Amino acid sequence: MIKIELVTGDSLIELPKIQDESIDLIITDPPYNLSKDYGKTKDNLEFEEYLEFSKEWLTECKRILKKSGTIYVFMGFRYISYIYDILSRHLNMNFVNWISWHYTQGIGKTKGFSPRHDDILMFSKLPNYKFNLDNIRVPQKYYRSINNMRGANPGDVWEFSHVHYCNDNRQKHPTQKPEGLIERMVLASSNEGDVVLDPFSGSGTTLRVCQQLSRNCIGIEINPEYINMASCRLQKPFTGFDSVDPRMERIPFDLNDEIIRNEYITNHIKWFLKNHEGSMDKFMKQVNEVYYKKTLKKNSLFDD
């Protein structure tokens, strides 16, 4: 039985209460110090004060991570290089990836280029860290018998749509992250039954993803309103994560052998769309357009 725990409190107070080397994975989206309104906290510290704040909570994160553990930190461009320096030089953690989350809609600018990505730092406590590549592969663009049809490494540029305000899962939180984005981190860097921590849990996205992926999760949040929001979210029926990598919805070209194609389609659904029921129709539309409508053949696997 997994345990999802919501803790109301300041991370600088709550993190020291957690046992040494007891956490498998940390995923967090801390305040960027950009004067956003989070209800209970000021996101406008002085420069040195913000760096000290960051150094303090990151030091605690290293202490509580297991030796095989990993941390993912979202951060805005103004401070990400300083966060990298804290993790790499001050804490001597192992750098793994600098991930770019690309999205198609964002702030519009009339001078300079409009931002269309966020950065995510991935560090592990030691070089021998947990990484489940098979759990996060993306579909190949073309079928080749020499390819691993379980899929390819997704790379370090990730495309996920924002959780738009018209989305049923949109919460009243200024920086809600897509569930599909967090799903990839959880699948890559933890196993079922592991303990995941989010020290700034906000709207509860990390907790919701862990709940559905059979991970234990602790979320620390200073704003009681967000705690209540996350608690309500955890009680809702699950109908699929609110976002998906568009590559998950594509069918490889050149799957010309019908037996291989039908086997692949069945596997594709199991491998890539397990938690994304909303993508099934789009995927099957791709299948029909590429392999059945063009050849006027009937899809025997998915007849009505």
Image (cartoon, helix red, strand yellow):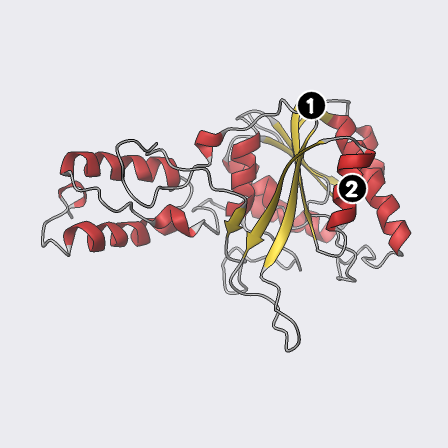
Q: Residue at x 22, y 44 (%)?
A: 254
Circle 1 residue: 66
Q: CA distance from mark 2 to mark 1?
A: 21 Å
Mark 2 vs 1, N-terminal side: 1
Q: Which mark is residue 85?
A: 2
Vertical position of residue 144 compared to residue 175: above or below: above
Query: Quadrant location of residue 91?
Result: top right
Residue 111 against residue 238 in the figure, above or below = below
What residue sits 78% from the left and 30% below the top? 92
- For the N terminus, give its image quadrant: top right
**Picture coordinates of residue 25, whole percent (x, y):** 64, 31
Badge 1 marks a residue whose secondary structure is strand
State the image coordinates of residue 208 (x, y, percent, origin top left). 56, 42
Amino acid under label 2? Asp
Q: Considering depth in this image, is 58 or 176 the residue closer to the camera? A: 58
Q: Is disc 1 surrounded by few (<14), some (14 to 19) or many (20+) residues within 10 Å?
A: some
Point 21% across, 52% down: residue: 290
